[in-house]
Amino acid sequence: MPDPTANEWNEDNLQSLQSHILAEEQSHPQATGEFSWILSAIALATKTIANKVRRARIDDVLGDLGETNPQGETQQKLDVIANDIIKACLGSRANIGVLVSEEDEEPTVLRTHAEGGRYAVLFDPLDGSSNIDFSVGVGTIFSVLRLEDGHAAKGVEAILHHGARQVAAGYVLFGSSTVFVLTTGNGVNMFVLDQSIGAFVLVKSNLQIPQASPIYSVNEANCNRFPEPYREYLTWAHESDYTSRYIGSMVADVHRTLLKGGLFMYPPTAIHPDGKLRLMYEANPMAMIIENAGGRAISEHGRILEVEPTSLHQRSVVIMGSPDEVGHVQRFIDS
Ligand code: AHM
Ligand code: MG
């Protein structure tokens, strides 16, 4: 019989994102505390975006702007609002040198390494935003890279590193609840925004993706334009009684895959021969999360995290999820 007078609150069941990051930093003797500044800015930005997303219809900011982003895709009003919020929240953090956004052609250089700019933050401010008018889950994705001394002189090259060099990555899903999933390379933790106190609280530490799960998540309407191995995989999955789930928002589809297991992929198509998703601020951060949860994340030529980027907005084929499920697709690609 539980003691009703016992205090059930302890550090395991009420820990904010902020205190979690501080505790993690304290466990690294060389940590300077700089990192918590960046993550607290991301938390502030995403809480603000969550509020905008919820109020979008009331504030009449749904729909597109009639303009396109650097990839030629239609910008939603909320894409631009979310981008501005992130830049406003991160721009004043003294240790951020460079911001890279899906919505901006060029990186925003805030300060050089000599001026204290130690990190670059790369982000997709509102992924899946074509779903926003219908109250479907959308999200912010971010990747944090450490900058080397002298980065200002090297320009974009200072940021063109493979994803294995990320020092942190995460996403915030604006769904029926607002969920913050974070990795700093040491497991994956999940926080939920408690609206009543305005803080992200830890709900699950050390998330592990299931080893296998018969679910695939892909835009199957493109099937006839997929290369042969993907079509063969889908035929195999149909014959193996797999089920399908596809929301069309990467954050929501990857989040489900992380929790329930299965496979998420965006193969090459006629329109997007290199895949549709962007390497540096969509594929890489999601790959870091999935790998840290025990899953696999590959393009057609090996680990996504080992792809050497040649441009900021380049695209990548994405195949990620439970290790066994990724293995099945790889089998068809390799045969
Ligand atoms: P976006 O960054 O412009 O929102 O595009 C990325 C989105 C992903 O969230 C999603 O996985 C994909 O595009 C869906 O593409 P499609 O509609 O071709 O299935
Ligand atoms: Mg996106």
Image: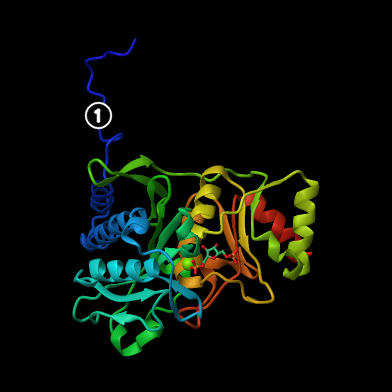
Q: Is residue 288 visible?
A: no
The amino acid type of the residue labelled 1 equals Trp
Tell me where residue 124 appears, x and y as whole percent: 42, 68
State the residue in front, 297 or 149.
297
Q: Position of residue 97 (x, y in %)?
A: 27, 76
Residue assigned mark 1: 9
Q: Residues within 10 Å of mark 1 (few under 14, many from 20)?
A: few
Q: Residue at x 52, y 77 (%)?
A: 308
The local secondary structure at tag 1 comes to loop
Question: Where is the C terminus found, in terms of image quarters?
Answer: bottom right
Could you tell me residue 289's position as x and y percent?
46, 56
Q: Quadrant of residue 222?
A: bottom right
Which quadrant of the figure has residue 333?
bottom right
Report if residue 211 is visible in the image: yes
Residue that sits furthest to the top in the current view:
1
Residue for point 48% across, 75% down: 74
